[in-house]
Image (cartoon, rainbow, N blue to C red):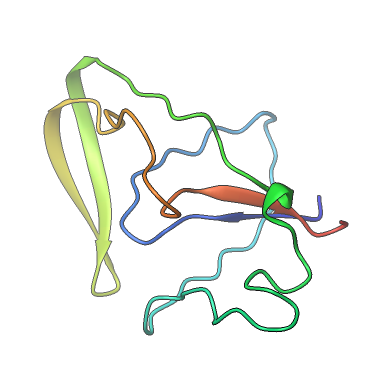
Amino acid sequence: PLEIALIPRGLRFRVELLHAEARGYVAENFGAPMRLPELGPIGANALANARDFLAPVAAYEDIEGDFALIAKFQGRLWSAAIDHSPLDVVAWHGNDVPCKYDLAR
């Protein structure tokens, strides 16, 4: 509750629920990519500190088998069969990482 997840465009991810029920809201940006504003009197992150944005530890799956890669393109979902896990990324680079932010902070 009161947390948001920020997932960069084009990033592969999987959602695993901790409980049988879950609620949420998805907002998708169809316009120009979002970017940090110029540094100003309150800083690039407004009133939030960089330490308040929690990024996961990069992990990967080196698994072969039958997987489906589902991607969204031009407002439609597409599926492709692949012979390995789509989660085979070893590390994050720069600011292009998923993160969560606690809105109560």
Up-down: is 6 above or below 30?
A: above
3 sits left or right of 90 in the view? right
Q: How far from the left and from the top, in percent, is residue 52? A: 74, 50
Image quadrant where residue 27 sits: bottom right
Q: How far from the left and from the top, in percent, is residue 77? A: 27, 60
At horizontal 45% and vertical 48% (from top left) the residue drawn is 97
At horizontal 26% and vertical 28% (from top left) the residue drawn is 88
What is the tally of numbered marks visible in this picture?
0
Q: How far from the left and from the top, in percent, is residue 78? A: 20, 56
Q: Closer to the camera, 93 or 57?
A: 93
The quarter of the rendered structure image containing the C terminus is bottom right
Image quadrant where residue 83 sits: top left
70 sits left or right of 65 in the view? right
47 sits left or right of 30 in the view? right
Image quadrant where residue 47 sits: bottom right
Up-down: is 14 above or below 26?
A: above
Q: How far from the left and from the top, in percent, is residue 35? A: 46, 74
Q: Closer to the camera, 44 or 69?
A: 44
At horizontal 47% and vertical 71% (from top left) the residue drawn is 28
At horizontal 39% and vertical 40% (from top left) the residue drawn is 92
Up-down: is 99 above or below 30?
A: above
